[in-house]
Image: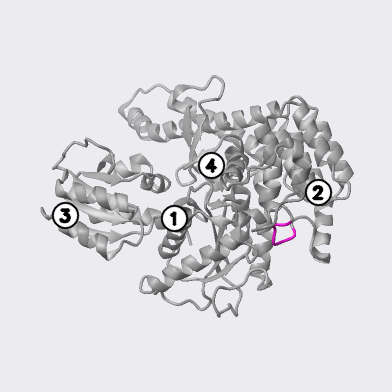
Amino acid sequence: MNAVLAVKQYVSKMIEDSGPGMKVLLMDRETPGAVSMVYTQSEILQKEVYLFERIDSPGREPMKHLKAVCFLRPTKENVDYLIQELRRPKYSIYYIYFSNVISKSDIKALAEADEQEVVAEIQEFYGDYIAVNPHVFSLNLLGCCQGRNWDPAQLSRTTQGLTALLLSLKKCPMIRYQLSSEPAKRLAECVKQVITKEYELFDFRRTEVPPLLLILDRSDDAITPLLNQWTYQAMVHELLGINNNRVDLSRVPGISKDLREVVLSAENDEFYANNMYLNFAEIGSNIKNLMEDFQKRKPKEQQKLESIADMKAFVENYPQFKKMSGTVSKHVTVVGELSRLVGERNLLEVSEVEQELACHNDHSSALQNVRRLLQNPKVTELDAARLVMLYALHYERHSSNSLPGLMADLKNRGVSERYRKLVSAVVEYGGKRVRGSDLFSPKDAVAITKQFLKGLKGVENVYTQHQPLLQETLDQLIKGKLKDSQYPYLGPNALRDRPQDIIVFIIGGATYEEALTVYNLNRTNPGVRVVLGGTTIHNTRSFLEEVTASGFCGRSTESSHAALRPSSRR
């Protein structure tokens, strides 16, 4: 189960099926994202694709010497563009690939438009999602629900993305969903409808244990996307933002022109692949080793080129040297900027208190620490608000709840009303009344012992104590102990055996901390394969946008204590 490989094989097959000769890759608004995650431009150039065009861009030049490889989502808009294209073809021959199921009536309309008989083939290649890592995928959708109900357009797009993933991985799963979430049930039903309707497509070779699709809701764990992160990939997304593997460094002080935007892709960057799940401290020493290795190679490259053999060796090694030089400067810049932000925003201290709020139950100590940090001028507006949000979520029903006082502290230190309103909005979105599970207290003696032992491990991991709720959910699922009463099956059947192939999908977005959880579960449970997907991949900023876009606006701060009595669920 490898999402990156699945999409990569589709793209390779598209280009290879069109045969030798110069090609143009014709895409729409969304498909370039899916392609760029699995192929670099230089890799595609090697396959004789010399031009990348958008089907909706006006005034494209006719180039009859090129073959067109079209990779498009099967939307009405794209079909209309394609009909216009085929009536007046700009290229010699068309190979058309839709990223999802296309209706027979659309195929008929395209056939009627193809009067000049330029279409060589039409196929469905199910690359209708963004393959982030081999075990992580996203749909890049923000604000998928309105209140507690789906936005209809987003539900349709999510259903398409999720069924495309299942088709690309060749899985026809049994479906379980989070009972406390209406959107989870609705999505489960929609996916099931597609599987039933397109039963021929889903007729894969039966495995002994059927695969399982588990649909969850972000509102069950609003803590995870609010925490600062300390592993490389998660930290880059939290502090700088990753968008389709691209990181915008244009705001970095004194940045050179060629590093204003960098690509971080585990497929093409060995250092990133080896370090993306490591802690920040380890990355610092690994980057030092990378630099030293680079320095060792450097003098050799600059030796005198006295013979033809010297020159030949230099030319042969130069591309690797150049690539390594690019890798070094990229990661030194990224890690340097992360380090600067950690110091400037006092993040070590902030993160320690966040972890205390997320993992411990000592109210007076937590309150004291939050108050202390709210007085610290180095703590940014976002970090101040985030601390109060974590406090509000954890101690929502606590007898000594001091949220009104903390809200006053936020106001006094000049935190904008937008952030102050978001405190009650986050509680409305993911507070106790909404959650189907208990986020904060260990469930049984084993869990309490685990937490105690974790506490004994000491300071080395004070910043990474938190485990997402997903960790526990998947742990229970793999052991066959996940309660049917909380996560029912859709339909009459249930798995008799422990699941082996699991696809988890989080409505409202997943996080890189959860991606790390899944990576570790895959590593430590031989025979179990888990793929994690979400409507998007969140950092704190995008999660707060999600909350706002879902219609949770929060109350004005004057009535902030009302946030402790959220309105009823639906």
Q: Quadrant of residue 105?
A: bottom left
For the residue pair 431 and 464, the one nearer the viewer reads as 431
Mark 3 burial class by Cα count in 10 Å: few <14, some 14-19, many 20+? some
For the residue marked with disc 3, what is the amino acid?
Ala
Mark 1 burial class by Cα count in 10 Å: few <14, some 14-19, many 20+? some
For the residue pair 192 and 211, the one nearer the viewer reads as 192
For label 2, the residue is: 395
Measure how far apart labels 4 and 1 are at the Cα level.
31 Å
Mark 4 burial class by Cα count in 10 Å: few <14, some 14-19, many 20+? some
Quadrant assignment for the C terminus: bottom right
Which mark is drawn over residue 113? Answer: 3
> Which of marks 3 and 4 precedes in the sequence?
3
State which region is magenta: 433-438
For the residue marked with disc 4, what is the amino acid?
Tyr
For the view shown, which residue lies furthest in the top direction? 254
Which residue corresponds to the image point at 73% horizontal and 42% vertical from the top-left? 389
Q: x, y (%) of residue 366?
A: 84, 42
Residue 65 is a magenta residue: no
Question: Position of 168 compared to 502: left or right?
Answer: left
Q: x, y (%) of residue 469?
A: 69, 57
Measure how far apart labels 4 and 3 are at the Cα level.
47 Å
For the residue marked with disc 2, what is the amino acid?
Tyr
Which mark is drawn over residue 157? Answer: 1
Callout 3: SS: helix
For the view shown, which residue lies furthest in the left direction? 116
Measure how far apart labels 3 and 2 are at the Cα level.
63 Å
Above or below 50: residue 437? below
> Which of marks 2 and 3 precedes in the sequence?
3
For label 4, the residue is: 272
> Which of marks 1 and 3 precedes in the sequence?
3
Q: Quadrant of residue 198?
A: bottom left
